Image (cartoon, grey):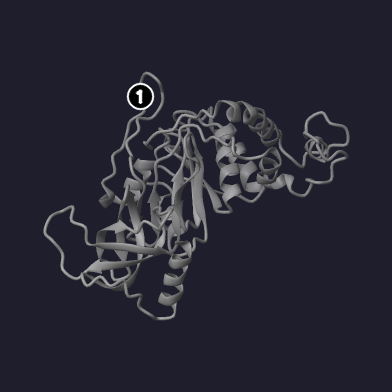
Amino acid sequence: MRTNQKKKLQSHDAGETTDLQDSTLGPEQQGTIISRFGQHADVETDGGHLARCNIRRNIKSLVTGDKVIVRLALTSESGASRIEGIVEAVHPRHSQLSRPDLYDGVKIIASNIDQILIVTSVKPAFTTQIIDRYLVAAEDTGIQPVIILNKVDLITPEDAPEIDAALERYQSIGYQVYRVSSITGEGVEQLHALMDGKVSVFVGQSGVGKSSMINAMMPDAELLTGDISQNSGLGQHTTTTAKLLHIATGGDLIDSPGVREFALWHLPADRVGWCFIEFRDYLGTCKFRDCKHLNDPGCSITEAFKAGEITEDRYNNYHRIIASLDEQRHARHFRAGPDE
């Protein structure tokens, strides 16, 4: 089946038309998956037409952002939920975003993403531990991560020095950091420039304001927003299905369901270390090959930390992640749900 799908792609790239002996379908067209619903998908053709389509059984994986070959029906039936065509084949992905899934192992969420925008905020709480978990996940995918601090209008004079210092530490090791308020509009223009010409995805815990930020940038998106629960301090989940949205000022955004706690149990410890980018120059230079980078003699990571080359925050967060891996692998338990 995969061979047939590959042949379809090759023949289409060569300008040929595959004859499926189906007189009800028109010629093959290029398209993009806007959203996936079970055995159906909403596909936008290069001509700008949006059609709900069936998916060929030989296609084993199809997610929002995929570039596909689609054939539309020559005549369409009336009705808002009518099926207008068939997704024939999927082009190779240049990137894909995945997360651990309790039942499916590592589950692909979306594809062909250029950058991951890691959203944090001062409410419900600002914590570098969560930022570093998302950075590890982003580095593992090979997709460029960018840190977004939302709700900057809520920063108090007491909290400002600690937050400023933390963000400066990320900038010092090469990460882009943006400050945004969807209430005042601060930083929104800079985000538009950042996202122009790229496919982006927002990730972050519930309550950090991802949906409100999208609404500030794209008023026509009409996404639901959720206030932080007064009782628990956790955001109310509202987004339910991954969808690709076009930004009027340029670029695309994939609004995707997220996870409250970003589990990393599928990553081996050495991969987690590599995903801390400032560790890379020291990895492989420790005295012992099975070095845990903690109290081991001759540990290059620990020596770099003591010399001030690695910050205390990042060093401690690395060990917190490593300590959580065995527990997560054993339980295979993480809280997953629709995004805010």
Q: Quadrant of residue 163?
A: top right
Foreground: 293 or 304?
293
| Residue 185 locus on image (x, y percent) | 37, 46
| Residue 318 locus on image (x, y percent) | 67, 35
Local packing at callout 1 (Cα closer than 10 Å; few below 14, some 14-19, many 20+) is few
Foreground: 290 or 258?
290
Compared with 179, 102 (above or below) is above
Q: Residue at left 88%, top 32%?
A: 297
| Residue 13 locus on image (x, y percent) | 44, 76
Q: In which quarter of the image is residue 340?
A: top left
The amino acid marked with disc number 1 is: Ser
Q: In which quarter of the image is residue 182?
A: top left
In the picture provided, is 299 more to the left or to the right than 235? right
Foreground: 25 or 143?
25
The residue where tag 1 is placed is: 229
| Residue located farthest toward the bottom when viewing the structure as drawn | 15
Work out which quarter of the rendered image holds the N terminus and state it: bottom left
Q: How many marks?
A: 1
| Residue 286 locus on image (x, y percent) | 84, 41
In the picture provided, is 65 more to the left or to the right than 301? left
Foreground: 163 or 46?
46
Q: Residue at left 60%, top 48%?
A: 140
Secondary structure beneath dot 1 equals loop
